[in-house]
C-alpha cells in the first residue's frame, strides 16, 4: 500500500468535558479515504477512537505517530478530531487522560515528526480541534483552506 493514514476521534475524556461527534467524524473520514469510487484500495487506515477498543493515551498516540511516519516513503495522512488546548508551553492535542495542566501531546511534536518524515509525495495533517492553527507557520507546504473552498477527493 502506498498510502497510509492514522485517524483519531476522541469523544470521551477522563478529566475534561466530553465531545459528541469526533468518533463519527473519524469514522466518516475512514469511509471516505479507504477506497476509491471504483472500490480499489486507496489508503491503508488505522482508526483510534474513544470509545473504542484501546485507550487513546499519550503513549498510544505517540506510538501510532511513530508507526505512521517511521520510514514510510509514500503518502501519509493524519486526522485528529477531539479537544485541543493551549498552555504557556504551546498547543496540544488532548489525549484521553489529559488534564487542563497536562493536556496531552504537543502539536510541535506532531509537526516535527511530519517535517522529519520521509514521506515523498503527500503529507497531510488534518486537525479538527481548538488551537489547530497554532503551528502552521512551521509546516512545509501549508495551504490554509476556508469553509467555502472546494475539496477534491484524495
Image: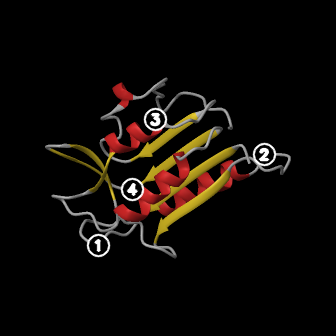
* Of the pair 112 and 102, the residue shown nearer to us: 112
- Which residue is tagged 3? 116
Identify the residue at the far front of this view: 71
Answer few, some or many: residues within 10 Å of disc 3's Cα (few below 14, many 20 plus, some between 14 and 19): few
Position of residue 131 measured from the top left corner of the image (x, y, whole percent)? 30, 41
Answer few, some or many: residues within 10 Å of disc 1's Cα (few below 14, many 20 plus, some between 14 and 19): few
Mark 1 vs mark 3: which is more N-terminal? 1
Mark 2 vs mark 3: which is more N-terminal? 2
Q: Do the residues labelled 2 and 1 touch (CB within 8 Å)?
A: no
Give the Cα distance between marks 3 and 4: 25 Å
Identify the residue at the far right of this view: 38
Between circles 3 and 4, the one closer to the viewer is 3
Answer few, some or many: residues within 10 Å of disc 2's Cα (few below 14, many 20 plus, some between 14 and 19): few
Secondary structure beneath label 2: loop
Q: Do the residues labelled 2 and 4 touch (CB within 8 Å)?
A: no
Residue in the picture at 15% in, 58% down: 101
Query: What label sits on residue 36 in the rendered view?
Result: 2
Q: Are marks 3 and 4 in contact (CB under 8 Å)?
A: no
Mark 2 vs mark 1: which is more N-terminal? 1
- Which residue is tagged 4? 82
Give the Cα distance between marks 2 and 1: 37 Å
Amino acid at each position: 500500500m502506498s498510502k497510509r493514514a492514522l485517524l483519531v476521534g476522541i469523544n470521551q475524556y477522563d478529566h475534561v468535558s466530553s465531545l459528541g461527534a469526533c468518533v463519527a467524524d473519524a469514522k466518516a473520514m475512514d469511509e471516505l479515504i479507504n477506497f476509491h469510487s471504483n472500490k480499489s484500495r486507496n489508503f491503508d487506515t488505522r482508526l483510534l477512537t474513544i470509545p473504542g477498543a484501546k485507550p487513546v493515551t499519550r503513549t498510544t498516540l505517540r506510538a501510532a505517530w511513530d508507526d505512521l511516519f517511521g520510514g514510510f516513503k509514500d503518502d501519509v495522512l493524519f486526522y485528529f478530531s477531539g479537544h485541543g488546548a493551549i498552555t504557556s508551553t504551546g498547543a496540544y492535542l488532548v489525549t484521553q487522560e489529559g488534564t487542563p495542566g497536562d493536556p496531552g501531546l504537543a502539536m510541535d511534536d506532531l509537526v516535527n515528526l511530519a517535517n522529519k518524515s520521509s514521506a515523498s509525495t503527500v503529507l497531510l495533517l488534518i486537525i479538527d480541534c481548538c488551537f489547530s492553527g497554532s503551528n502552521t507557520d512551521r509546516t512545509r507546504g501549508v495551504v490554509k483552506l476556508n469553509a467555502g473552498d472546494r475539496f477534491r477527493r484524495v
